[in-house]
Amino acid sequence: LRRTSVQDLLRSTELDREVLVKGWVRTRRGNKYVQFIAVNDGSGFNSIQVVANAELFPEEKLKADGVENGAAIAVRGKLVASQGKGQTVEIQAEEITVYGSADPAVYPLQKKGHSLEFLREIAHLRPRTNTFGAVLRIRHAMSFAVHQYFNSHGYFYIHTPIITGSDAEGAGQMFRVTTLSDTKPPLNEAGAVDYSQDFFGKATNLTVSGQLEGEVAAMALGKVYTFGPTFRAENSNTARHLAEFWMIEPEVAFFDLQDNMDLAEDFLKSLVRYALEHCPDDLQFLNDQYDKELLSRLRFVVDNDFQRLTYTEAVEILKGAKQKFEFPVDWGTDLQSEHERYLVEKHFKKPVILTNYPKDIKAFYMKLDEDGRTVRAMDVLFPGIGEIIGGSQREDDLQKLQQRMQEMHVPEEDLWWYLDTRRFGSAPHAGFGLGFERLILFITGMANIRDVIPFPRFPKSAEF
Ligand code: ATP
Ligand code: MG
Ligand code: MG
Ligand code: MG
């Protein structure tokens, strides 16, 4: 007899046959005549109900065998129609085997449910809860949807380096890579380890973005994207920042800012649509459990155009707002998340794409506007999140790029290879970075970014 997944059984219309399931006990309840055991094998949100009659399985025997919350078991029995609400089938148990029990006296996951803060401290057990099962399945589905979107639109997936020599972008936010080996590390004159020599004679860092390498690939393959781990030494302790997160970065040759905005909007809408189509049970649970407006918010994003306006227009709106902000708004300062969320949640009540930011608050590689004061940047702002995407049309003119690098103290020697893309066959191009965990935050309706990645990395997260 072959094992069947719980989800396949729940969908099955072929009744009164012998089946075998393997999974974990979610709950066991009942009375002295009959016990009901909910078994979940991770294949989907719903568990299958196993009915254990007392003649074969007295409650005392189930207890003695360790058929308790959290135990791993196999059940052989007959698949029959169910009278219970919310399910069409159940298993009439004939044989129950326990692989591993979980002593209810010490098993940390109790029936009563736990706070998300507590579950963060037992990140190794939280995938077993309904909430994290749902989040992790959605995370999987979205990562697949990202590849599917790009693949079906003619993009090539590029693997950019994780250890990099350039630190052009991440001033102050880089993790330094060091070597621990039995050969002697290079020492400086004072006798201390010389970290500037560390990666076999060169200073290296963990990547803060795959963009510059992505641009290199776009200048040959036309339409590319990266999707990889990204590291930033964020010490900000916000609910939106991790020290290790995943970023999706498309980069496209012969694209301008307009094309870039169209891509970002279409991409985000199709990801949300994919989640609605492929994760209905998990989303329904999160909607009911945490956020009653989750599903309607997701549908709204799919069905409505994003609001597009310039940074300058946004500053005017914010200056005229009745709301008092913690940080004052002035042309030339970067917007805080309170400002972004005001625009999205209070003013426009829809996703917003802000463009043409002052050049001094944006990176050196963004294309200068004709006015010489702003650049062709775009940030996509989402309800409950603030910035979900940051992107731009890139400066494709060698001289202008060199001048911007000088102004912003980016050494040319470090980026000679990057400048070659402008020196030889330069072309207009644009791209953006989408924080994968911010996308998952939006789609799951979770409030804290630490709850949408299996093992969050943040200050004081050393345990796992
Ligand atoms: P923020 O203003 O929120 O700090 P950023 O402007 O520094 O973000 P970018 O350099 O524009 O971020 O990176 C592109 C995208 O990566 C952001 O729009 C966001 O979705 C995501 N992102 C950036 N930093 C983090 C982080 N520390 N943790 C998770 N996601 C992040
Ligand atoms: Mg930042
Ligand atoms: Mg930002
Ligand atoms: Mg940004």
Image: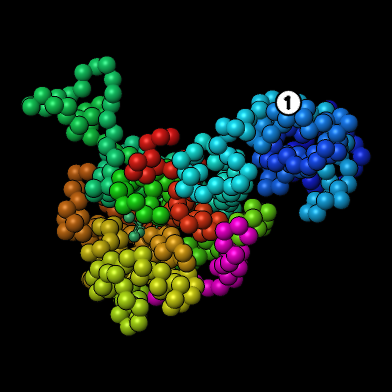
Q: Quarter holding the C terminus? A: top left
* Residue hosting label 1: 65
426 left or right, relative to 122: left
- Residue 342 at least partly seen: yes
Residue at left 83%, top 30%?
57
Residue ranking furthest to the left: 189
Rendering quarter of residue 315? bottom left
Residue at left 7%, top 26%?
189
122 left or right, relative to 274: left
Rendering quarter of residue 6? top right
Q: Quarter holding the N terminus? A: top right
The colour scheme applied to this rendered structure is rainbow
Amino acid at dot 1:
Asp
**In the image, is residue 120 part of the stretch drawn in magenta?**
no
Q: Residue 251: give x, y in percent of width and height.
A: 42, 54
Rendering quarter of residue 21? top right
Residue ranking furthest to the top: 182
- Residue 219 at least partly seen: no
Depth check, front residue: 444 or 434: 444
443 left or right, relative to 233: right
**In the image, is residue 298 part of the stretch drawn in magenta?**
yes
Residue numbers of the magenta segment: 288-309
Residue at left 67%, top 56%?
280
Neighbour tally class for label 1: few under 14, some 14-19, many 20 plus, Cα within 10 Å? some
Q: Residue 389: give x, y in percent of width and height.
A: 42, 60
Depth check, front residue: 22 or 256: 22
